[in-house]
Image (cartoon, rainbow, N blue to C red):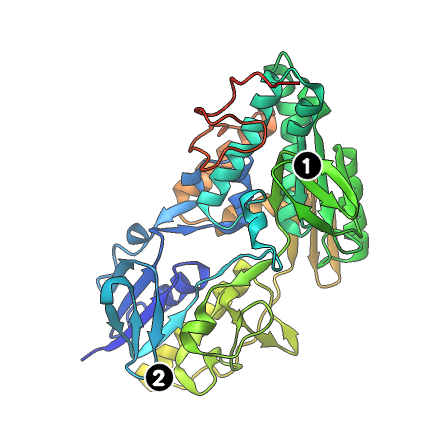
């Protein structure tokens, strides 16, 4: 019987393992609860109508169609039976393994305030992105219909909580959308009056970057009309707005970008984990006490040279390559690669149109040139020539025309938000004073 390898999660780490085992005499099963691989670094551009969903997501089966040794299953994992060496799926389905790779990523965490999610969605999946896009665009539509000035101002107030790269990149495009792209398309409301806020409980934005780049990013956002608020946490979040410290700020659109929590892998494996739920692994990425199980990417607490490996795409791909080399060595009798060492590819974040920050060791770059480097780097990591071409053309069109190409309102709200009627989309409601 061939060696059976099960990969749970078709993100950067999981797919890299599958690709790294090409040509090895084994049977591989890839399990994911969604049928697509997602390029998460550009997810915020779907949320802000810069890109379409198909530009950053690809069917898993299509990516692996030429691999006769790979079976793809669409399903949600309920657990792992380590004694029987089986992955447990719903309806009593069990998938046996000899080697198991778990790379199931993270979800947003609300630090014990999970009820905030309804009013402040995060951004980790395509569904999250289209929900955020819908709320953003409907806010402008409702402001156009409202005859109450206070309600109109609340509809045109956008708050992003969390000032890491995702939060910074979100507010940069939202400000561009409100202040530069949409003003000529609305008649009853002035979208240039929109208030875009970036809220960070810590002392500065982009804390993973150096202080000079953080200060540059803050100033660049301020010049673009973003209100940067640091040093005060959000203490309440409702459908009407947020409480910042002791002050209530009316805001109908709130987006969460402040924290993450790993998948339930620690519970499946009954493994030791850190405060974010990431499974603590050995230096070769295997589970302590069970070398047949690898835990990778955002699901794993990995240290390299005494430092915690960040949850970014390059790190996940490096871990995937290392796990694939280890499994290949075991099956071929070659010398295994040993401990994992992370090669830091630097930090990148765009601050808005024509501005970005890049940090690679002591090397720093900011401004227009950094923005071009950021764009080239992201296009390089996209899968396939079609995606690279389409994203490049969309960005070029947006750069030249100052227009976003994917401003479509889709889906329906499960629960009406403040200022929205229970009918259809609520955009035709006349607000009562």
- The residue under the point 26% across, 63% down is 70
- Read off the residue under disc 2: 330
Is residue 362 left or right of 411 when viewed as pictured? right
Q: Quadrant of residue 247?
A: top right
Q: Circle 2: is it few (<14), some (14-19), or many (20+) Cα within 10 Å? A: few
**Inter-mark Cα distance, 1 to 2:** 48 Å
Label number found at residue 178: none
Quarter where residue 431 is shown: top right
In the depicted structure, whether residue 147 falls above or below residue 151: above
Q: Quadrant of the C terminus?
A: top right
Picture coordinates of residue 330 (x, y %)? 35, 84
* Nearer-N-terminus badge (1/2): 2
- Where is residue 231 shown, x and y percent of the image? 80, 52
Using the image as rendered, state which of residue 379 and residue 235 is in the foreground. 235
Q: Which residue is mark 1?
A: 354
Residue closest to the far left: 1
Q: Residue at x 56, y 54 (%)?
A: 114
Q: Residue 417, relative to residue 5: is it above or below?
A: above
- Badge 2 element: helix
Q: Quadrant of the N terminus?
A: bottom left
């Amino acid at each position: 019987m061939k060696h059976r390898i099960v990969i749970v999660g078709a993100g950067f780490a999981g797919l890299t393992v599958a690709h790294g085992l090409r040509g090895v005499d084994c049977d591989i099963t890839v399990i994911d609860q969604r049928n697509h691989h997602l390029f998460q670094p550009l997810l915020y551009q779907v949320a802000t109508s810069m890109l379409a969903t198909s530009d950053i997501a690809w069917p898993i089966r299509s990516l692996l169609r030429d691999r006769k040794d790979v079976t793809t299953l669409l399903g949600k994992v309920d657990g792992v039976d380590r004694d029987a060496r089986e992955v447990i799926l719903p309806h009593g389905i069990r998938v046996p393994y000899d080697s198991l790779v778990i790379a199931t990523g993270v979800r947003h965490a609300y630090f014990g305030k999970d009820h905030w999610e309804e009013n402040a969605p995060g951004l980790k999946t395509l569904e999250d992105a289209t929900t955020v896009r819908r709320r953003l665009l409907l806010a402008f539509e409702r402001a156009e219909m409202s005859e109450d000035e206070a309600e109109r101002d609340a509809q045109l107030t956008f708050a992003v909580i969390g000032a890491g790269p995702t939060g910074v990149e979100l507010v940069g495009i939202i400000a561009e959308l409100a202040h530069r792209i949409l003003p000529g398309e609305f008649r009853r409301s002035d979208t240039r009056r929109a208030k875009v806020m970036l809220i960070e409980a810590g002392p500065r934005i982009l804390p993973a970057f150096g202080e000079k780049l953080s200060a540059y990013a803050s100033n660049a956002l301020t010049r673009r009309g973003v209100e940067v608020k640091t040093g005060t946490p959000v203490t309440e979040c409702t459908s009407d707005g947020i409480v910042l410290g002791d002050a209530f700020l009316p805001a109908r659109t709130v987006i969460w970008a402040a924290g993450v929590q790993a998948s339930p892998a620690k519970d499946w494996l009954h493994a030791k984990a850190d405060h974010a739920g990431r499974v603590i692994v050995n230096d070769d990425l295997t589970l302590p006490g069970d070398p047949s199980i690898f835990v990778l990417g955002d699901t794993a607490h990995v240290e390299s040279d005494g430092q915690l490996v960040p949850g970014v795409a390059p790190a996940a791909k490096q871990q995937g390559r290392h796990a694939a080399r280890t499994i290949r060595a075991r099956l071929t009798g070659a010398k295994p690669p040993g401990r994992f060492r992370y090669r830091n590819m630097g930090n990148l974040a765009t601050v808005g149109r024509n501005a970005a920050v890049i940090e690679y060791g002591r090397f720093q770059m900011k401004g227009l040139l950094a923005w071009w480097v950021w764009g080239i780097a992201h296009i390089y990591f996209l899968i396939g020539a079609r995606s690279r071409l389409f994203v490049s053309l969309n960005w070029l069109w947006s750069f030249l025309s100052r227009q976003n190409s994917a401003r479509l309102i889709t889906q329906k709200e499960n629960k009406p938000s403040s200022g929205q009627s229970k009918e259809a989309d609520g955009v035709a409601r006349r607000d009562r004073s």
